[in-house]
Structures are given as C-alpha cells and as structure tokens.
Amino acid sequence: MCAMPCPTGITQSDWESLVDACGRLLDRWGGRLSELGWTTADLFGMDARAPMARLDHAGLVRFLIGRDVVEVSADAVKLRTRNGGKQRLRRGRAGAPGQVPLWQLDGAL
C-alpha cells in the first residue's frame, strides 16, 4: 500500500493516515484479530464508490484515523482518541455489496 497512489475518493492526507493505521494495526493486533476471526473485510473493507463516506461499508481501519486500538475482542474493539477519549466500535457488516479491500479501491470501479 505504501507504493500505491492515493485512490479516488480519498484525500492524500487521509490515505497516508490509512496506510499508517494499517501498519500499526497489523503490527500490534494482527495476530490476535486473526485468532478472533476478524476477516479482511472486517478490517480493511471500504465502499468502492464512496470509500470515506459509506461508513456502513467500512472496516476497522477506516475508523483509525486519529484513533488507536487499545483492546480487541471477537465482536468489538476499544479505541482511544488523540485527546484520550475512549470509544467502542462493534465489528461491522463484512462483505457488504460494493465493499472491497482498501488496496483494491481503484481497480474495483
């Protein structure tokens, strides 16, 4: 993903944040999320036509701009915001129509 151009529908700043978030997520939580059954779509899914707007088609990484994962379970993650606030994000709808992995955005249109 680091070598990919910024996909259509995502600002350069958000793209850089998403690439960074993917690395942080995999480094810290990848093994545990896999053990708990989280799928590629659960983690990296994005809507092919409106990747930043369609939150109902978004995987976890979309919500990591400005947030860090602090705890994971089979059905949710706990996030910490930059200002120290905490949020709980439930596992989404994997495989929604029009959803593709983040790295296939431009090829999916």
Image (cartoon, helix red, strand yellow):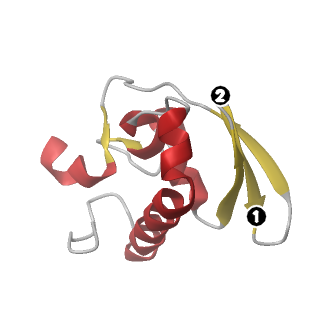
**Is 49 located above or below residue 22 in the figure?**
above
Q: Is residue 101 left or right of residue 27?
A: left
Q: Residue visible at 49% across and 51% down? A: 30
Determine whether 68 is above or below 17 in the image.
Answer: above
Q: Mark 1 and mark 2: span between their CA atoms?
A: 20 Å
* Label 2 Cα neighbours within 10 Å, binned few <14 / some 14-19 / many ≥20: few
Where does label 1 land, which residue?
Answer: 81
- Residue 56 x %, y %: 52, 32
Residue 68 as seen in the image, left or right of residue 95: right
Q: Position of residue 54 (x, y in %)?
A: 47, 40
Asked whether, in this view, residue 98 is left or right of residue 84, the answer is: left
Q: Quadrant of the C terminus?
A: top left
Q: Residue at x 52, y 58 (%)?
A: 25
For the residue labelled by badge 1, is the local secondary structure a helix, a strand or a loop? strand
**Label ID, residue 75:** 2
Q: Is residue 109 in view?
A: no
- Tell me which residue sits at (18%, 53%) in the image: 106
Q: Amino acid at mark 2?
A: Asp
- Viewer-side residue, 13 vs 33: 33
